[in-house]
Amino acid sequence: MADSKNRATAAAILPLVGGASNITSVAHCMTRLRLGLADRALVDEDALKALPDVMGVVDDETYQIVLGPGKVARVTPEFETLVEEGKAAAPAAPVASGPHAVTADELAAQGAELRAARKAKNATPFKLFLRRIANIFVPLIPALIGCGIIAGINGLLINLHWLPGVTPALAAIASGFMALIAVFVGYNTAKEFGGTPILGGAVAAIIVYAGVANIEAFGQKLSPGQGGVLGALGAAVLATYIEKWCRKWVPEAVDVLVTPTLTVLISGLVTIFGLMFVAGEISTGIGTAANWLLDNTGAFAGLVLGGLFLPLVMLGLHQALIPIHTTLIEQQGYTVLLPVLAMAGAGQVGCAIAVFKRLKHNKSIRTTIKSALPAGFLGVGEPLIYGVSLPLGRPFITACVGGAAGGAFVGFFSMIGDKVGSTAIGPSGWALFPLLDGNKGLGTTVAIYGAGLLVGYIVGFVATYFFGFSKQMLVELNVDTRTAAGESPAPAPAGTTEPKEPAKV
C-alpha cells in the first residue's frame, strides 16, 4: 500500500514538471526531490504546489520539490522508474504539451532565456563550489544520523548501567562509520570533481590507516585520522587532477596500469607529507575557534548565528557549514553550532503561528500554515519559508528575530559552561532531540535545547504579531480570499484546495 501511494505521488508530479522527456537528472537530499529540467517553462508550479504531498518548491540550479524526510527517499525511486518507462516508451516524442505549450521556436527562446537568467544569478564560482561541497557531504547525512542516534542510545545505557554486554557492540556500530568517514568523503569528492571515485577513496583511506603513526612529517609523528574530512577532501581533489593529467599523455595500452598507480602514489605522498599536517592544523583551528566563540561571546554569537541562518539558507551559503559541522563531530563527538542554528527554525514556527492568528479571515494562508506547521516543528522549514514568511516580507524578518533570540539563549548557556551539541547534522527542531549531546549530561542538554526552542517560538510569535504587518498589509491580507474575488465564501468541495495567490503578496 505504501509503495502504491508513493508511486501515485511520483505519477502526479511527473506530468506537472513537463513529463519524462523534460527530465535530465533525478536526485534527492534529506527533504527534496531535485530535478534537472530541459525546459522550466513546462512546469505547472501552481498545480504542483497544490499536490497533497508537496510542501513547497525551490527554483534553484536544480528544480527542487519539498516532500519531507522519509517521504522523498521513497518517492524518488518510483519517480526514476516512471521517467525511465516514459523515455523508453516514447524516446523521440516531443515534450508533452500542456497549459504552457507554445511553438518549438518560442520554447527554445524561453528555455534559453530562463537558463541564462538562472546561470547569471546562481552560477557564481563561490556558489558552484558550495554546491559541490553539499554534493559531497549530503549523501553521508543518513549514516551520520543513524550512527548518531545509536551513539546517544549507547551513552544513555552506559550512564544507567544497563545491558553492559550490549554497549560495546553499540559503540562499535556507532563509531565504525565515523572512523572511516574520510574514505567516504574521498570517494564522493572524486565523483563530484570528475575523477574515478574509488581512487579518491583509496587516497583518503591513507588518512585513517593506522600505519601512518610510524611516519614523521614536519618534525612530528603523524596520527591516524589527522586532517580528517578536510584532508580527505583535499587528497581526493588532488588525486582527481593528477588522474586527469595522466589521462592526457599516458598511452591507452598502459593506461589501466600507469594512471591509477601514479594517481595514488603522487597524491598519497603529498597527502602524507603535506596535506595531513596542514589539514590537521586547520581542523584543530576550526574546533578551537568554534569553542572559543561560544565560550567567550556565546550570547552574542548565538544571536548572530541564529538570526542570520534563514538568510544564509535562502542564499545557499549554509552549505559552507557542512564540513565545519563534520569536523567538529570528528573532533569532539558533536557539533556545538547546529543547536544554535536550529533556533532559526523555531523563530520560523513562532512567526507562522502569529501569521495564523493575525490573518483570521484569510483561509488560504491559514490552510497553508496548518499543513506546514507539523513539518516546521520537526525542523523542515521550507514550506513555511516559501509558502508563508518570505512571500509576506516582514514576517521573514521577524522570524529571524525569533531565531536570534533562541540562538542567544543557547549561546549564553555555552558561555557559562553548559555546551549543547548534536552528534549528527541534518535534522533540527524536535527531530534533533535524539541526537543531542553535551558536557553536562543528557538531562541538562535536553532542557537547554528545549528551552531555546521555546524562546524562539515565543519571540518569533511576539515579534511577528506586533511588528510583522503594516496596517496596509492587514487591510489587504486579512480578508476571505473568495469573497474578495467576488465568489461565494461557502466551503470548498471535498478534495479541492484553497487558492494560494494571496500568500505571494
Image (cartoon, rainbow, N blue to C red):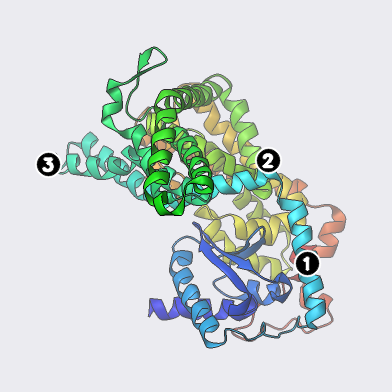
* Residue type indicated by callout 3: Gly
Label 2 sits on a secondary structure element that is helix
Nearer to the camera, 411 or 24 = 24
Residue 426 drawn at (x, y percent):
48, 48
Image quadrant of residue 389? bottom right
Disc 1: which residue:
112
* Residue type indicated by callout 2: Val
Image quadrant of residue 423? top left
Nearer to the camera, 457 or 32 = 32
Q: CA distance from mark 3 to mark 2?
A: 48 Å
Disc 3: which residue:
165
Residue 336 drawn at (x, y percent):
48, 33
The residue at 78%/67% (across/down) is 112
- Mark 2 nearby-residue class (10 Å; few <14, some 14–19, many ≥20): many
Q: Which image quarter is the N terminus in? A: bottom left
* Residue, far left: 165
* Residue type indicated by callout 1: Ala
- Mark 1 nearby-residue class (10 Å; few <14, some 14–19, many ≥20): some
Image quadrant of residue 311? top right
Nearest to viewer (mark 3 / mark 2): 3
- Mark 3 nearby-residue class (10 Å; few <14, some 14–19, many ≥20): few
Vertical relation: 477 (above or below) 51: above
Tag 2 or tag 1, which sits nearer the N-term? 1
Q: CA distance from mark 1 to mark 3?
A: 63 Å
Residue 135 drawn at (x, y percent):
52, 51
Residue 412 drawn at (x, y percent):
54, 27
* Residue, far right: 472
Evaluate whether residue 154 shows in this view. yes
Vertical relation: 86 (above or below) 307: below
Instruction: Point out which mark residue 401 bears.
Output: 2
Tag 2 or tag 3, which sits nearer the N-term? 3
Evaluate whether residue 182 shows in this view. no
